[in-house]
Image: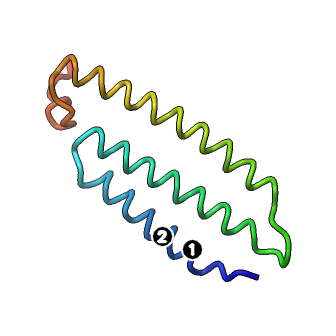
Amino acid sequence: MIPYQPFIISTVLLMAIGLGCLMVRRDMIRLLMGIEILFNAANLNFIALSAQVEGFMDPLAQSVVMMAIVLDGAVIAVGLAMTLNVYRHYRTVDVRRLRRLRW
């Protein structure tokens, strides 16, 4: 049986990096990168914890993670399209400047 502690430690580090990126950065691209890191941390955690039974890897967890990766790709694609449209219209992707544009 493969020890799962390194995977859990990696997941915690990825979660910390993703949350730090979401809290510190004010750029829309970096916010999307932080969201992507958080999604990947959740997927790694799900796969690591699904392999805890001796000699058995749960195929349900793998299929759920594959579906999550596909949906994550779609979410990031929509986010990047929105970021591109915001940049074309306002010439900035800084979230602080965009908040001032409220009506």
Vertically, is 18 above or below 26?
below
Vertically, is 61 above or below 90?
below
Q: Residue furthest right?
A: 55
Specify the amino acid type for callout 2: Val
Q: In which quarter of the image is the C terminus?
A: top left
Vertically, is 29 above or below 23?
above
Numbered label tally:
2
Tell me whether the residue at label 1 lies in contact with that at label 2, contact meaning CB atoms closer than 8 angstroms: yes
| Residue at the spot 45% in from the left edge and 27% down from the top edge | 78
Vertically, is 87 above or below 51?
above
91 displayed left or right of 84 = left
Which mark is on residue 78? Answer: none
> Residue 96 location in percent, x, y?
17, 37
User: Label 2's element?
Assistant: helix
7 displayed left or right of 55 = left
> Residue 69 location in percent, x, y?
60, 44
User: Label 1's element?
Assistant: helix
> Residue 10 location in percent, x, y?
50, 72
Q: In which quarter of the image is the N terminus?
A: bottom right
Specify the amino acid type for callout 1: Ile
**Badge 1 density bin: few <14, some 14–19, many ≥20, Cα 10 Å:** some
> Residue 29 location in percent, x, y?
30, 40
**Badge 2 density bin: few <14, some 14–19, many ≥20, Cα 10 Å:** some
| Cα distance between the residues tagged 1 and 2 | 6 Å
Which mark is on residue 12? Answer: 2
The residue that disc 1 covers is 8
Examine the image and state in which quarter residue 72 appears. Answer: top right
| Residue at the spot 44% in from the left edge and 64% down from the top edge | 14
| Residue at the spot 50% in from the left edge and 34% down from the top edge | 75
